[in-house]
Structure formats: C-alpha cells, structure tokens
Image (cartoon, rainbow, N blue to C red):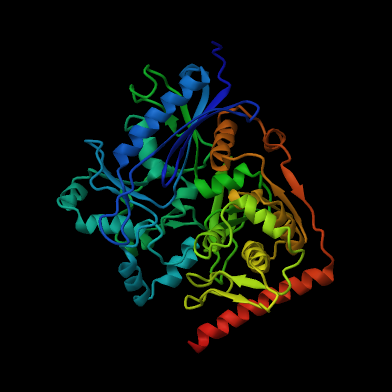
Amino acid sequence: MTKAKDMIAVIDQSTSGTKALVVDRNGCVIARSSAEHIQYYPKPGWVEHDPLEIYGQVKAALQDVLRKAGIGAANLAALTVTNQRETAVLWDRHTGLPVHPAIVWQCQRTAEACQALRRANHEDTVRAKTGLVLDPYFTATKWRWMLEHVDGIQEKLRDGSLLAGTMDSWLVWKLTGGKVHATDYTNASRTSLFNIHTLRWDEELCGIFGVPASLLPAVRCSDEVFGVTADPDLFGEVAEVPISGIIGDSQAALFGNGCFYPGMAKATYGTGTSVLMNTGNKVQEAGNGLVTAVAWGKGGEITYALEAVIRSSGDCIKWVRDSLGLFHSFEEMEELLNQVSDNEGVYLVPAFVGLGAPYWAADARAAIVGMNRGTTKAHIIRAALESIAYQVYEAVELMQSESGIQLKELRTDGGASDNRRLMELQASLLDRSVVKSGVAELSAMGSAYMGGLGTGLWSSLEEIHSNAGAGIRYEPGMGEASRKRFIDGWKHAVACVLYGAKEA
C-alpha cells in the first residue's frame, strides 16, 4: 500500500443520508459508500434528525469507503465536508450531546415566529444585512425555538455550556474531538445572523432573533485547514488528517461545476431547480425573490452569487406520469416526444404551489394553455418538459437584469439534465452554451476540490478545470424568430395563469 498523501476523503451529509467518497489526484472517484438516516416528523410540518445517528453514519461510511478504496488514513491529504445547509444543532460542549434533535431546513415550526418578525418591521434589516428573506427555511429561528422550548436549556446558556452550529459545525466539532467549533462562510451566510457585508456575526441580528453570538462558531474560508481528526474511533487508529473543504452543498455544486468566474452559472434539475450564478467579489443586491448568497471563501477572498429556486420542475414530469398517467417509463416518454416536432402552442405552467421568481404569485395555480382539438398527450408531455427550460430562462434573465452581469454559459446537473431535448431547448432559449456535467456527485467534488486546494493536492483552479473534463456541450440551435415566438408563447401562458389568480 502506498503511503503517498494523494487522496481526498469526502463526507457528503445530505438531508436524506450520508455519502462518503474517495477522490484521487486526477479528480476521479475511486470508491463510494452511503447510508440513509431516519427522518422524524413529530408534528405536521415539523422535520427532525438525530445528530448522533448522523455522526455515527459519517464514521461508518468513512471507514467503509476507505476499505473499498484499499487505503488508510495515511493516504489522505484531507478530509472534507459538504452538508445540508440550514439545519440547526445545539449541543453541550462538556457532554458532547445534542440538547434536542436537529431541526431540519424543511421544518416549518417557526413560520409564526417569522411572521411576528415581519410585523415588527425587521424584514428590511434582515434582507439588507444577510441577503435573505425572513423564512423558517433559515437557521436562526430554529435555534431560538430550541432556546425557548428545551427543558433546562437556560441553565446551560447561563453556565456557558451551549454551542450552536449548522450540520458542518457539528461534524467538525465531533471529528476534532471537541477541539474546533467553526463553520465556513457559505453555511454562516444561511443562518440569518451573518452580515455578508462585514463578514461577521451581526450583534443587531443576534438581538432580533434572540440568539447570543457567544454560541456561534468561528467563521473561516472553505479552503482553510479547520483542524485535524482526533476521534480515536474514526479510522480504527490514531490519525491526524487535516480537515478542509467545508462548504454548503449548493455552493459546493457551483464550485464542482467549475463556475469559478462571474457570469458562470449552474442549474441543478431536481424536484425543483436550483439556479446559482457567480457574481464576483461584490455583493449584488437582489429583488424579485432572488437571494444574495456567499458562493465561497477561498484564499482569504469572498465570492458572491445570486440564487433562485424554481419550485416545480422534475416534479411536473412526475405529475404528468403519475397523476395523469400519460406515460409509464422514460423510454415511453421519449417515444411519445418523437411524435411531435413542435409544441404547437401548448404550454404547461406548473404553478402547483404558486409561482416563484420573477412573479411571486402564491395564489397562482397550474394550467395547460393553448390546446386545440388536435392536441395529444405527446404535446402535453412536451409542454411539461419544456416548462423546466422556460422557468430556468426566466430565472437567468432576472439574474442578469438584477446584477448587470451577462451569463457566460450554464452548467447543468441533476436528473433532467440527462434529457438531450431539454438541454438543446435550454441552450436556444438562453442563447448561450449549456454544458451538462459528466460528474454525478458535484457537491462532493466541489468540497474535494476546495479541500485539495487548501492542502496543496491541487495548485490552481486551472488544474481542477482540466480534471473536471468538458462534459456534454449544447449550443443554441434556434433562429431568433422561433426563439421569440416560443418565449412570447410562454409569457402569454403565464399571463393567463396570473389573470386567473387575480380573478379568483
């Protein structure tokens, strides 16, 4: 067994489970391990995880992936972590035990608290300092809920026993044997307590949300070495592996997609679609439902991004399949799509839970517009697929308008990015190149690349870019007249939906 430190071990801790990967110097994944953890739903709208279960999975997955790769801790240049971003943990620094189950980013228990903060006119302050809207999605109100509802917690607060963190902070603290309480800029920026202008925890925000700054972790760049492993059970041997590459999962996917420069953007096509665009080293004020994000901290410098979340994309395809029964397999879907060469004016606006950016019409509801007697199920399936591309187009147009930065190219990943027809349409609507990644685990790769840069395994972004490979490139292939006709048809369909919401 070689003892060269030329491997990266990655922990990818997501909402549903934990993955561990081993990545070599060439950017190749040579081994994988994964396990799901339990989702707890104690009340309607509440979602919790067990932090101890998750840390146990981290250790088991890491040991398993090293065994599969045939290496030991001595081969690792770094251990890196990417994570579900807004999930809240509070724990006792003396016992190492959580004081309550982790409150997951999806949990809605603090919706009323957010409404109260809006009524108290705090939303503009929060938005100006953090780039975020007031929403239970983010971490601060979750910590406040625990501080108000957990038995005996005020005593722990008074005696200095409590520590607060997102999932990355919890894992780093456990991995280092309780020696390091730290987070990175991406995770800190999702808490509603971090000022993205001053790059510090904000005392006014801590006061608004009722979370003492003394509980919060130190904030560092993602490529810094946070500490070394010190849990003797981690590798089955005493080993001090540098811990670096700490970064939230969406930002890690942006980095893993190679979107290193302003104007580069990624879209992850899942149940919904997350669109992030690199906007460089200055904060771009955002409106119309966009969120200003810290893309990453690297080499002591901060890169920012704009973020848009599309609520229904892949979910729309699932609805057409499962609820309407128009096809049963993706092979059948492709056969049906091949029967029509044009949408013939049929559009599906998937406002099943309202419309997001740039419309933000919560009362809007889904509709199929433009059908005639010759419309077939193939047209409806095509309209469902194309609705994804139209929504991404509008998100990118909004980002360009808000930032003044023109899109260079769009990098794509996620299940629907495998569909050639969708990617070709996306390139034509945007009038830009679309590059479909050849790598599946982009959050993990972004974390690996960041940690590898921090520990010297890679020396530059150019070296990483050469490792990442070109992917599948799609170029615009539609004339301007056709492009305008399709976009105008989509906007007309959305206008019909908005008119219906207004009338209702």
Furthest toward the top, the residue is: 1
Q: Which x, y percent locates residue 296?
A: 55, 47
Q: Which x, y percent locates residue 393?
A: 67, 64
Q: Which x, y percent locates residue 40?
A: 30, 50
Residue 269 lies left or right of residue 90; in this view the side is right
Pick the front one: 373 or 366: 373
Task: Give the mark count.
Answer: 0
Furthest toward the bottom, the residue is: 503
The residue that appears at 56% across and 55% down in the rendered structure is 328
Q: Is residue 411 above or below residue 469?
A: below
Q: Is residue 171 above or below residue 88?
A: above
The answer to whether residue 263 of the structure is visible from this angle is no
Q: Is residue 176 above or below residue 425?
A: above
The answer to whether residue 70 of the structure is visible from this angle is yes
Pick the front one: 127 or 23: 23
Residue 111 lies left or right of residue 81; in this view the side is left
The residue that appears at 44% across and 69% down in the rendered structure is 125
The residue that appears at 26% across and 43% down in the rendered structure is 98
Pick the front one: 217 or 310: 310
Q: Which x, y percent locates residue 280?
A: 64, 54
Q: Quadrant of the N terminus?
A: top right
